[in-house]
Amino acid sequence: MIEVKSITKQSLIDFEDSLFMLVESVDKFDAGKVLYVDAIVVNSSDPTDYNRIFKAVRTHYDPDVYLTPIFAVAYKALPYLQEHACDGITDLAKYEQIAKRVREIKVNVEQLYLQQQYTSSEEGYLYKLLQFLFTRDTPFTPIPNRFSRVNYYFPLLTDLLDDSEDHNAMDILAAGIKKGYLTEGKMFDKVHLCESCGSAHHNLRETCKSCGSVDLEIRDLVHHFKCAYVGPETDFIQEHSDDLMCPKCHKILRHIGNDYDKPSHIYVCNTCDDPFQDPGFTYHCVDCRDSKEIHHLQEHRIKSMYLTTKGKYLVLNGLPKKIERKSGLATDVLGIYDLDIFQSLLKQEQSRCSVTGGTSVLGEAHITDTGMNVLSRREMQILQGELSVTLKTYINEFEMVTSVNPYCYYFLLINPDEERKENIKDVIEFNLQNLIKSNVNKSEVVVEVDMKPLNEIGDDFEF
Ligand SMILES: [Zn+2]
Ligand SMILES: [Zn+2]
Ligand SMILES: [Zn+2]
């Protein structure tokens, strides 16, 4: 009986050309089955249902599963976070809106290069995030979340990371920015994370600088005008009378403003009795129970982010393939070198330029073409070889070319003038485009050439 119930509770909705999986019970939710549908519609207002579905879908190894759009049925009780973490909300009677969104996302998913291997899990997380942003075509926007260790939900990343590694999301995003795949948008908040465990859940307390106790009391300071004595109000309080009496001159204080005033207050430690004006400030981490001065908290800026052209290029073409670095290049042609040799020669030219004031430039030709995704490995290598040879014919004999992968080529121009740079950019873009069009079926190729003076690229240039 239970089996039957769970199947009917996970029904399919056929709408126009899309197939939706309607999930009403997460108990039997099988992320593997998502492969056969275009989107998921969650009919629940319980946040834990969403958390489980998001985790199961987003951590799946298959892009056709982890990039599947997830929609929520619009309930008043649906929390802000779940509503905004979804790809949209829907009405159970009307599916036009989400069907349109599903089609948009699907077109983008189909363009992606199917990357399967990553050198580290962090690289995989970043790559999947870039894919996610490309397919959604929306900025990356963190959402406040009281159930997160860092107080924020980071789209996709939070679902990929375990609760205890939540703070790694910041490192992954920073890596994305450093590599130029992401660019920063508006900053709208800051979080302060425990130095020991990365949690944002802590209590801030005024603390005694002498003994470290947090058992403090604030007392008014009393200033007796007549004798100029200043001390905590407790010094003036008498045991058997409500009147305040000056401990120095033993006069009774009658009228505030006339006899005395309260210029400020003072802290008194209930543990060591020390009085002081400025207490220390410490935090007590709720997660690891560490206590430290607040300057040890790690500040992180919470910002929206955007996918850059370089990031788009990456998800359309895949990570640079190290094995292919040597294979396709026609290194028997003078001036075409493997990347490592090219890099050494580039370094030499860089130092020559800095001594002689040379104006040599590093050119970069990027190819974007989803049509190339269907080529076999061997066809790719042949194309890479032809493109590098063609590229070489447009530059001087003493200049050089390398290629990182079939989509990315670098060339070095020795002291070119502006006119030559312009000219070469046009010639290369035009001719490489034509060469690819004549070799690749259904090519939608775009070749972009970019040039940077050697004195601007620094030592840590990433190829
Ligand atoms: Zn103390
Ligand atoms: Zn006095
Ligand atoms: Zn902690």
Image (cartoon, rainbow, N blue to C red):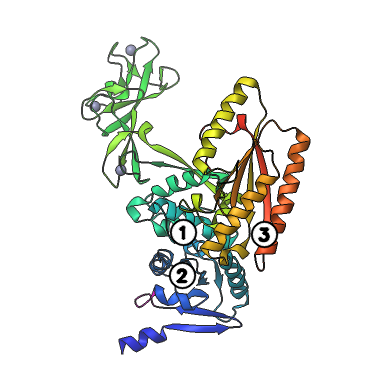
Mark positioned earlier in the residue sequence (3 or 2): 2
Which mark identifies residue 373? none
In which quadrant of the rendered view does residue 346 lie? top right
**Which residue does the numbered mark 1 point to in the structure image?**
156
Which residue is nearer to you in this view: 348 or 398?
A: 398
How far apart, in angstroms, are the residues tagged by discs 3 and 2?
32 Å
**Which residue does the numbered mark 3 point to in the structure image?**
436
Give the residue displayed 39% in from the left and 48% down from the top. 168
Which mark identifies residue 65? 2
How far apart, in angstroms, are the residues tagged by discs 1 and 3?
35 Å
| Element on which disc 3 rests | helix
Residue 297 shows in the view:
yes
Q: Is residue 77 above or below residue 218?
A: below
Q: Which residues are magenta?
A: 25-30
**Magenta residue check for 62:** no
Tell how many labels: 3
Q: Of tags 1 and 2, which is closer to the observer?
A: 2
Q: Of tags 3 and 2, which is closer to the observer?
A: 3
Amino acid found under the numbered disc labelled 2: Val
Q: Where does the image place residue 413, in percent across and percent down from the top left?
A: 66, 36
Q: Is residue 266 above or below residue 40?
A: above
Farthest residue toward the right?
Answer: 419
